[in-house]
Image: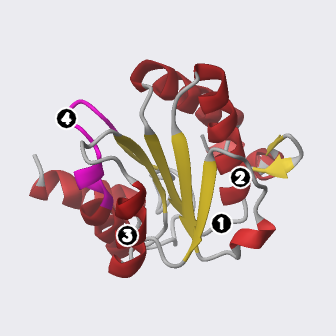
């Protein structure tokens, strides 16, 4: 993990020419989860430059499966993200209640979402989890990305982040 992180090759990973900012093996696992669950909605919450490329990747997988819509929510300008008929792009902080309400309005009445949280600080990840978890059915997934930071084993000075958020979430929702 340290070698992959130190090399930063994941920063060069693209989907159809658009940056995704994720290691290719992560994307492979994402498509496996999509194939298994076939959710009607996939929520991608992040603030990095790869959000649009990941939304395009997920929408492309949904095309192949013949099911699903994507909502990509982050602070970057939606007009700068690549478009796709299955993708809706929202601007705003994913952990903000008003933004989460916009996402929930796009969700089906019966929880059927798959959620990827690519946020940094522990409070943002926990806040986003609390807002989006109700969209996920029992047996579904909320994937918390980047749990390797804050010395697990990389970027020891990151501060409380995704790993600490998972610990907090599991303490609240065993």
Q: Nearer the viewer, residue 133 or 166?
A: 133
- The first of marks 2 and 4 along the sequence is 2
Quarter occupied by residue 27: top right
- The first of marks 4 and 3 along the sequence is 3
Residue located at (40% from left, 25% from top): 37
Residue located at (37% from left, 80% from top): 98
Q: Are marks 2 and 3 in contact (CB under 8 Å)?
A: no
Residue that badge 2 annotates: 21
In three-dimensional space, the C-alpha distance between marks 2 and 4, rounded to whole angstroms, equals 29 Å
Q: Which mark, residue 48? A: 1
Residue that badge 4 annotates: 138
- The first of marks 2 and 3 along the sequence is 2
Dot 4 falls on a residue whose secondary structure is loop
Comparing marks 2 and 3, which lies closer to the viewer? 3
In three-dimensional space, the C-alpha distance between marks 1 and 4, rounded to whole angstroms, equals 29 Å
Expressed as whole percent of the image width and height from the top left, the position of residue 21 reads: 71, 52
Dot 1 falls on a residue whose secondary structure is loop
Q: Is residue 116 visible?
A: yes
40 vs 21, left or right, is left
- The first of marks 1 and 2 along the sequence is 2
Quadrant in which the N terminus is drawn: top right
Q: Are marks 1 and 2 in contact (CB under 8 Å)?
A: yes
Q: Which residues are magenta?
A: 132-141
Comparing marks 1 and 3, which lies closer to the viewer? 3
- Name, please, the residue furthest toward the right: 17
């Amino acid at each position: 993990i340290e070698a992959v992180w130190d090399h930063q090759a994941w920063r060069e990973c693209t989907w159809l020419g658009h940056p995704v900012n994720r290691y290719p093996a992560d994307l492979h696992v994402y498509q496996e989860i999509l194939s298994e669950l076939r959710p009607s909605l996939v929520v991608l919450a992040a603030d990095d430059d790869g959000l649009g490329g990941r939304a395009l990747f997920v929408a492309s997988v949904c095309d192949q499966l013949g099911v699903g819509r994507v909502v990509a929510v982050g602070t970057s300008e939606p007009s700068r993200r690549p478009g796709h008929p299955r993708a809706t792009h929202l601007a705003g902080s994913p952990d903000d209640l008003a933004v989460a309400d916009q996402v929930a309005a796009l969700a089906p009445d019966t929880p059927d979402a798959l959620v990827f949280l690519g946020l940094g600080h522990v409070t943002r990840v926990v806040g986003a989890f609390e807002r989006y978890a109700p969209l996920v059915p029992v047996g579904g997934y909320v994937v918390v990305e980047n749990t390797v930071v804050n010395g697990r084993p990389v970027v020891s000075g990151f501060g409380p982040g995704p790993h600490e958020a998972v610990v907090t979430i599991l303490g609240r929702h065993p």
